[in-house]
Amino acid sequence: MEKNSLKKSNLNFFLEGISFKHVIIGNGIAGAHAAATIRRESPDCTIEIYSDEEYTTYSRPKLPQYLGESIRFDDLFIRTQDWYDNTKIFLQLKTRVVKIDPHEKQIFLENGGSTNYDRLLIATGSHSFMPPIKGSNNPKVRTLRTLNDARELIDLVEECRHVAVIGGGLLGIETANAVRNKDIDVTIIEFFPRLLPRQLDIEGAGILKKIIESRGIKIVLGVVTEEIQEVNDSLKIRLNDSTEIHADLVIVSAGVRPSIELAKNAGIKTNRGIIVNEYMETSEPSIYAAGDVAEFNNTCWGIIPAAYPQARTAAINMIHGRKEKVMDIVPSNTLKVADIDLTSIGTIYFEEKPENVLEYRIQDVEKGIYKKITIQDNLVIGAILLGDNTNLQDIAKLIKMKINVEEFKEEILQPDFNLKKYQ
């Protein structure tokens, strides 16, 4: 879809000083950051947030740590109720929005209430994807997406001797590591032939696998879970290679899907997510979307580094009209995987490497270090830093600034590399 094919809205209709009523559906990273931006830009406007969760904004990436009891409950929260009160943002928790009426500019609540808006931001996020596995409706098959999920899993895990985690992505590995830290046997079951297929190439994933296995976590790759059966109070997991794995609990970590139902039912254009243009406008005037639920240039990022700029852009334009554009971002994740530093930026893997692409690597299997940069036409387009983030800032700058590295490309991964020397 062309960027400007969405209905034009809010263009040339804003007057400085007019105070609008801004309503936000969803109180995750995108919703809360948008609210903060709106309040900064417009001190006197009305801001209302509606969330079906019972908690203020918290960090979903930290949920595995909470499950493993390595952080406290209070450490999860990014925004406290005092912050909403002090910034005069009306936050309504445990309140599900069931309908949007774009023509009357109203939203309707499950409790029978409703409210109007001048500008609406949909930041409904995403929900856990449950693959079509026979038997997955068993109450001993769970997902980890919300704080309530984590609190329930804490109690369930205490009764387990063996837990199976379906999914070898970031959340799956972090969840497995958290459970293993409780001295419980854990098996990771992954469809792809390597761990973290979005963040690591084959070599890096191989090193990570060895590190994780050294901690007592079993890993099964390249298999599909076909059925989960309950047998004698435990679960039997049947894989497509006829292997059977027994566990007391299964945690499915098979990715997420944008929560688009509200928008779709309101006639707002959707694909995998809610389709937005560069101003974060949807197909309906005065309605914006940001965060996991938004689809820009055929991409639903589903990562925090995308949620912040999208939320900011939406908020600025909700106040001022088409003042700011959001650009495609370079995918970047800096995180801890089972307590191991990992940064993955940009394009890090090609099924068939083009002739104009070079790859440079440094690895130390014993120390669990793997570093790689991908260079195309003398520009760094991607990097992996596993176990050692020494060169992170310089490499990130090379990618962002599109600096020609022809003269020093073989030195970039060296521990003593300093970009200032070449500028």
Image (cartoon, rainbow, N blue to C red):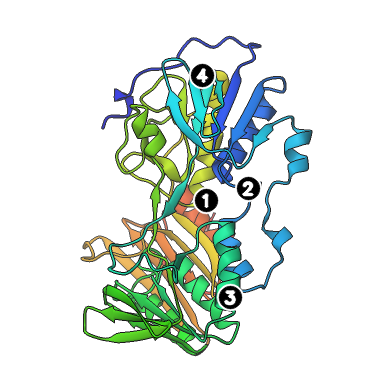
Task: Measure the C-alpha gap from mark 4 to mark 1.
Answer: 25 Å
Q: Can you identify the residue that label 4 sits on?
A: 321
Report how far apart the C-alphas of labels 2 and 1 lie in the structure: 21 Å
Residue 99 or 362: which is nearer the viewer?
Answer: 99
Q: Nearer the viewer, residue 390 or 330?
A: 330
Q: Nearer the viewer, mark 2 or mark 1?
A: 2
Q: Position of residue 356 (x, y in %)?
A: 25, 60
**Drawn side of residue 300 relative to residue 65, left or right:** left
- Report the disc number at residue 339: 3
Query: Residue at label 1?
Result: 304
Q: Earlier in the sequence, mark 2 or mark 1?
A: 2
Name the kind of residue labelled 1 in the image.
Ile
User: Which amino acid type corresponds to the residue marked 2 in the rendered image?
Assistant: Glu
Q: Is residue 319 left or right of residue 127?
A: right
Q: Secondary structure at mark 1?
A: helix
> Neighbour class for label 1 at 10 Å: few (<14), some, many (≥20)?
some
The residue wearing badge 2 is: 54
